[in-house]
Structures are given as C-alpha cells and as structure tokens.
Image (spheres, helix red, strand yellow):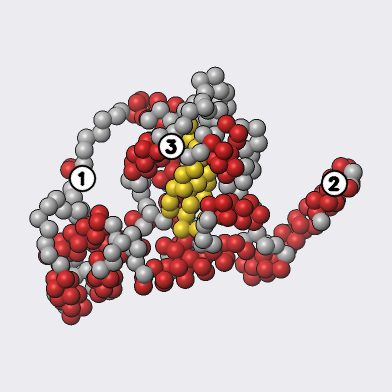
Amino acid sequence: MKQALVKLLPKNTISTLKSKVDNVDLMFIRLFSKNGFLASFYYTFFSRQFYREHKAVLDGRLAYEHSLALIGKSCILLRRNIHRLEKGLIMQPRREIFADGYILETVECYNAAINSTELCSDEKKWATDVLTRYFEVVGHNSKIDKARAIFTSQTTADSETLSVPYAYKDLPDCPVDFDQLLTLFQRRRSVRWYQDKSVDIADIRKAVNAASLAPSACNRQPFEFHVVNDSDKATDIANCAMGTVGFSDNLPCIIAIVGNLNAYPAERDRHIIYIDASLASMQLMLSLETLGLSTCSINWPDVEQREKMLSKKLNLKYHERVVMLLAVGYADHEGGIPFSQKKSDSLLVKEVK
C-alpha cells in the first residue's frame, strides 16, 4: 500500500505528508519519553521497532535451556563456568574456598559435555585441565567435596601441556611497536572496489583463528562468521543491506557476522552479542589486512523486512541476529578510498577527575 501511494502521489505531496507524520511522531516522542512506563507503552502500541529483538531474546533463552540438554560442539554453560573458575584461580590473594555456589552445576555440566560425541576436543581439554587445577588448590566443604568426588571418578589426569591460567610474564614478547601498529591501522581502510580475484578460504580461516583471540564476556564467544565465498551470492547478500548500491556487484566475498542469543539465560546480557562480535570483527579485519586482503564493514540497520530477507538467505534461527556484514577481497589498486576525517583525542577523551 505504501509503495503504491509513493508511485501515485506527486513528490511534493509525499514530502509534505512525511513532514506532518514526522511532526506527529515527534510530538508522541516528547510525551512518551517522560518515563519508562510511557516509553514501553509507546513501543507496544505505536511502534514495532523492537518487536524482533523481544522475540529473539525469548527464543534465545529457550534455546539456551535446550542447549543444556543437547550438547553440541560447544557448551555455553561449561564455557562460562570454566572461565569463572579461571578468574577465581588468579585472584590475589586467592581464597581458600571459592566457586562453591556453582561448582556442582559445573561438574554435572562437564560430565554431560564429555559424554557428548560432538564436544570439540580443545574445549574438553580446557575444561578438564581447569577443573583439575581447581580441585588441586581449593579447600573443603560439603558442596566442593561432592563435586570433587564426581569429577575425579570420571576424569583421568592429562600430563600434556595444560590449558590453565598462567603468569603475565609467560606471554610472548610483542614483535610490533606503536608506529608499526599505527601503520596497520592506517592501511585498514573501508575498501569498496576489488579485483576480479577469488579469496582463499584458508586465509579467512587463518584470520578467524586470530580474531577468536579477541576478548569475550565469560569467554562465551556468542558469534559465528557465515562466509559467502562466491561473487554472485556475495552480491545477493550485500544487496540485503542499505548503503551498498553502486559497489555490491564487484564483491568477491562477504562475511555475515552473526550473534547468537542462545548464550544467555537472562535478558540483561542481550547486547553482549554486539560487543563481543564487534571486538572479534575488528581483529578479523586487521588480520585479513596482514594477509593482503582488504575489507569493508557494512552497516546492518534493524529493519524488519531486511532482517527477514537476510535471515532466510543465511538460514538463520530467530535468535541468531546479524551484527554486520563484511566485504572481503583483493583491493583494486586504482579504487578510491574515502578520506573519512577521524575525531582526535581532543574530542574523544573525557578525563574524569
């Protein structure tokens, strides 16, 4: 109906109507922004902007509960609790008794996970090593002793290199100085014009492994990289976004960074997918740059029609949300790069005293 009216009505009429609608909307915003109750009322009855997020969060919570019963290649609860144990192990000073509020839950989850035929070996080793170290150093009470008995009856110690907390001094020396790093940042520009040359998936996998070292809340890493490594399909995916008109036809590869809300049992964490995925995406872009591959992050606005379109093409579940798209390829050396003046520290730094 809306599209039909746009075609039928003169442009000045459309402009006038739009201006009046915007003024009415602004009047409503002034009224309903006065407190939280009125704001919720507005988004319930006058706007459906957060409709998808509401349902996605609920679907994600259900998927989280389902993941506890049917453990796949990775287990969210196990990852979170093992990381919590690691933080307890490095505490200064370390308490004699810690994690007794969730250690039994962790061991029960661990037993279910190691009995899964799908759990990845690296995750299994990490969980086993950290739990082994925990029970070596923690004190005794009824909850911890019960968990210790369950764990030791199911586990055999591994003498290989342990996946446990280590001292800062054991980190590798930094091989780059600030000026070298700054040069990498200056080279990492938003490139929209690419050579007609295919991208090796091995390079993308290599860069993803580097990107996975980015920080993530409780080490849950609630994201995946959906790689479309075909120029025609990449263009089709890019056209789902707004702002790709004019250059989407020359993209050799595109990556959809997808956050998964099944990592959280509570609504309060619903925005972590965007934080964690963005941290990893920045490291991915820089990693690809060192491999000779240029990138362009493509904004993904929350538009219901486009969400449906892209979710269908990528076969996403409702609780899997696209964070951004990332074009990847070998830069056309004659292709233009926007200057994009950046804000300086004088505008960005606010010293708190």
Q: 1 or 186: which is nearer to us?
A: 1
Q: Nearer the viewer, mark 1 or mark 2?
A: 2
**SS for dot 2:** helix
Find disc 2 in the rendering and name its residue.
Answer: 7
Give the Cα separation between the discs numbered 2 and 3.
41 Å
Q: 258 or 105: which is nearer to us?
A: 258
Where residue 162 sits: x, y (%)? 16, 53
**SS for dot 3:** helix
Q: Earlier in the sequence, mark 3 or mark 1?
A: 1
Q: Above or below — where is 150 with respect to 303?
A: below
Q: Residues within 10 Å of mark 2 (few under 14, many from 20)?
A: few
Find disc 3 in the rendering and name its residue.
Answer: 285
Residue found at x 17% / y 43% = 170
* The residue positioned farthest toward the bottom in the image shown: 142
From the image, which quarter does the N terminus lie in?
bottom right
Residue found at x 46% / y 48% = 226
Q: Are marks 3 and 1 in contact (CB under 8 Å)?
A: no
Q: Earlier in the sequence, mark 1 or mark 2?
A: 2
Query: How many numbered markers are drawn?
Result: 3
Residue found at x 61% / y 56% = 308
**SS for dot 1:** helix
Find disc 1 in the rendering and name its residue.
Answer: 168
Where residue 254 sits: x, y (%)? 51, 40
Give the Cα separation between the discs numbered 1 and 2.
64 Å
Q: Are marks 1 and 2 in contact (CB under 8 Å)?
A: no
